[in-house]
Image (tube, helix red, strand yellow):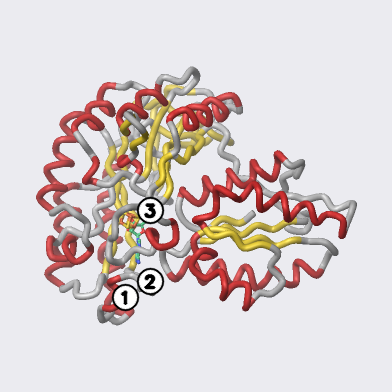
Amino acid sequence: MRTYGCQMNVADSSEMGRHLKAKGLVETQDPDEASVFLVNTCTVRQHAEDRAFSEIGRLKRWKTKRQGRKVVVTGCAAERTKEYLEDRFPFLDLVVGAKSIEDFGRMAERLLDRRETDEDLEYAVAAVDEKVAAFVTIMRGCNYSCTYCIVPYVRGREIYHSMEQILGEVRDRVSEGAREITLLGQTVNSYRHGQHRFDGLLRAVAGVNGVERVRFISPHPYYMSDRVIETMATVPEVCESLHLPVQSGSNTMLKAMMRNYTREQYVALVEKIRQAMPGMTLSTDIIVGFPSETEDDFQQTLSLIEELQFDWGFIFKYSTREGTPAAQLECWPEELIEERHQRCLELVDRIAVRKRSNLVGSTQDVLIEEGGFGRTRTNYKVHVEGDVAQGETVRVLIANTHRATLEGEARVQ
Ligand code: 5AD
Ligand code: SF4
């Protein structure tokens, strides 16, 4: 299985993997061994879609190498371009758009029922190893209409899973070894189901036996209510780390993007959250080169980064998505977008490196995920030397840091 794009897609891949395993398939990381190849696509930016398509193109050869092999394409790009995909790659066995992901089990069943073509076929799928830190999808789709974004078109409007279903999934993950649960949704904190709201869900998940840590991605600033902040600050299982996409530091751009908040509102929100949770880490998403973004608008993004001192961030070059309102606007030349991207990355990186180096000499609780690697509550990736077991939380002294990864990798001796 190959997964492109966001954490939501990673979780969808795991869910599909579980469906296939329930039908008797076994995992493999090796394409030569596999009989089913599943490509879970992303279409948020053109680049991700292009990479997935070239991978699909290469699978034609893979498929002919052994009789009965199947190629399945799922996800957001599959939703957006189903007809094109089936046309361009006639060898595909199944194309499942992101909106139909909940029906995947049924569709896969039908695909696997065609087994009579090759009795001995062993279906194989590589699932993502997310044993200790697991993801649970609580909602799908998005009711926002940020003008650059394709997600509402390919994932549809918001639907929420019930509290019972979510808690059931959390218990399942815990029984499989999970200690940390990350709740997922496009605007995860807009969750509501019956009387339940996001803060209540956070508390309930934190209360499940065996859950040590709770995180969530990605919240929308608009729904960061006082109740959510208070829950984060007072429920010990909820980690001191927040990924809060801002997209731009310019009010003109925020309006053009239809983000539903101003720079001042975002700053005030961050101040409130930091006051409630001193020592928390804050990360963000930023888009550079949105149509009509002037040098002055861009400078305001840089000044916001300086002002708020994000611990790390993901900086995206604006990518035109056909069918979105922003696609009507005139684009900046690629070189200009590239140049702003570089400048923004440099600033975010410089702050990230400095912040990370502040960790040295501190004591941190690290939940070990795999191979001596784990994460602090503030979501820094840490390598712990010595004998440590998966799923164990160890208290360590941070000895030194590496510049290697944006998210911060602190080596511990
Ligand atoms: N171009 C560039 N970045 C985008 N994102 C979403 N749509 C686009 C686009 N058209 C970014 C946003 C979002 C993240 C998941 O992807 O920053 O928060
Ligand atoms: Fe896209 Fe905006 Fe919805 Fe996020 S909130 S998924 S950026 S439309």
> In the visual, does 86 lie left or right of 403?
right
Q: Quadrant of residue 315?
A: bottom left
Q: Earlier in the sequence, mark 3 or mark 1?
A: 3
**Residue at the farthest top position:** 209
Pointer 3: what residue? 157
x, y percent for residue 255: 16, 62
Q: Nearer the viewer, residue 413 or 56?
A: 56
Of the residues shown, which amino acid type is indicated by label 3? Arg
Of the residues shown, which amino acid type is indicated by label 2? Arg
Q: Earlier in the sequence, mark 2 or mark 3?
A: 3
Q: Quadrant of residue 225?
A: top left
x, y percent for residue 198: 32, 33
Q: Quadrant of the N terminus?
A: bottom right
The reply to whether residue 350 is visible in this rendering is yes
Q: Earlier in the sequence, mark 1 or mark 2?
A: 2
Ligand 2 falls in quadrant: bottom left
Q: Nearer the viewer, residue 246 or 106?
A: 106
Q: Nearer the viewer, residue 62 or 375?
A: 62
- In the rendered view, tell whether residue 303 sits above or below residue 326: above
**What's the mark number on residue 321?**
2
Ligand 1 within 8 Å, label 2 CB: yes
Of the residues shown, which amino acid type is indicated by label 1? Ala
**What's the mark number on residue 327?**
1
User: Which residue: 14% across, 57% down?
Assistant: 303
